[in-house]
Amino acid sequence: MRADGRRFDELRSYSISPGFIGQALGSALITAGRTRVICTASLEPRAPSWLTSGGWVTAEYSMLPGATSPRGRRDPGGRGKEIQRLVGRSLRAAIDLKRLVGPSGGLSLVCDCDVIEADGGTRTAAITGGFVALAIALRRLRTQGLLVGEAILAPVAAVSVGMVALDSAAPVAMLDLPYAEDSRAAVDLNVVQLGSGGLVEVQGTGEQGTFSRPELAAMLDLAEIGCEALFVLQQQALAEAM
């Protein structure tokens, strides 16, 4: 039994609150256990100068100083920059960039993911909540006549999995690690998946040793279970936002 009483294949308590920031084109607050991330999607005034056709989606990620103890720094640093590149790649995988076009040409959107409380899984929560904020923004652009057609290929969600030892037993595969589990995991894996079934990215590290192919398969199976549940939660949030 895990410290919080969950099964090995069970997500933390999740919620996605759409429209959390009234001024944003699209926004959502995602809560995963004690981790909370505000995601906002905004239309940039112009597309990147190197873009010759279609549109573009990028992301920024930051953590409020008080999101962790002891206090963090406002500068995202190398870790934050690596995470925002991951979030941007993940969101672009969900979008047909060639169709991200309005009457005046290609559209560029940025998704800001701001962690207000961190207890593990901030990057995966940013991806899952960021998609909801982006989908709301695209819907509003279509309503306003600024987007010609539907640009979403499939929803995208992400979750953490890992090999964690309970007491003195051998490590076992667990879904959706909070910090207490993530910090002592023998293996840490972040999995990004599309609702259409394809994997976007798998980031895996043997933190305290190696892992076998059967163990990798077990972790990927758990990640698929978690992402399927998160796709349902995203759909519910988008229905609420209508």
Image: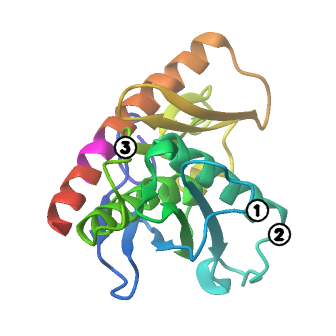
Q: Residues within 10 Å of mark 1 (few under 14, many from 20)?
A: some
Amino acid type, label 1: Lys
Q: Residue at x 68, y 53 (%)?
A: 51
Tell me the tag on residue 155. Answer: 3
Label 1, on which residue? 81
Amino acid type, label 3: Pro
Q: Earlier in the sequence, mark 1 or mark 3?
A: 1
Residue 26 spot, x, y in % from top left: 37, 72
Given residues 170 and 49, the one toward you in this image is 49
Residue extending furthest right? 78
Front of the two marks 2 and 3: 3
Tag 2 near tag 3, CB within 8 Å:
no
Residue 160 spot, x, y in % from top left: 54, 43
* Relative to 56, 155 lies left or right: left
Label 2, on which residue? 77
Q: Residues within 10 Å of mark 3 (few under 14, many from 20)?
A: many
Tag 2 near tag 1, CB within 8 Å:
yes
